[in-house]
Amino acid sequence: MLNIYISLFILSFLLTYLVKNYAIKKSIVDIPNGRSSHVIPVPYGGGIAITITWLAGISYLFSIDQIKQDLFCALLIGAVLAVTSYIDDLYRL
């Protein structure tokens, strides 16, 4: 099990790095305003890497019967939240 956790950590790290570089290259950044917690522009999308890794992790745990179907389905609702959050970032809902 330790191997899968290490693999997921590395996947998360690499995906975050790639998403960050892509966002910077394409100027997909958040310009701070009065409500922002940052003072310099920061790239959008880091949560995408975390969400992909999280979904991969819970899918793997479900496939090897480490979590029950009810819990797996409940955790999948987090994907809806992640997509909604990303759309909010892009379009300022």
Image: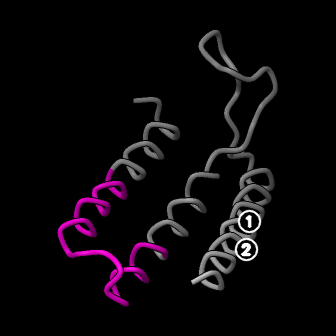
The magenta stretch spans residue 21: no
Mark 1–mark 2 Cα distance, whole angstroms, equals 5 Å
Range of residues picked out in magenta: 57-80
At x 41%, y 73%, the residue is 58
Out of 30 and 13, give the one closest to the viewer.
Answer: 13
Residue placed most toward the observer, 64 or 32: 64
Classify mark 1: residues with Cα within 10 Å, few (<14), some (14-19) or many (20+). some
- Check residue 40 in the rendering and tell me which mark sits there, or answer none: none
- Residue 9 x %, y %: 68, 69
Image position, residue 23 (x, y; %): 72, 53
Q: Quadrant of the N terminus?
A: bottom right
Check contact, mark 1 vs mark 2: CB within 8 A.
yes
Q: Which residue carries the number 1 mark?
A: 13
Local SS, label 1: helix
Residue at 23% x, 75% y: name it.
68
- Label 2, on which residue? 10
Q: Nearer the viewer, residue 41 or 2?
A: 2
Kindly state the secondary structure of the residue where label 2 is placed. helix
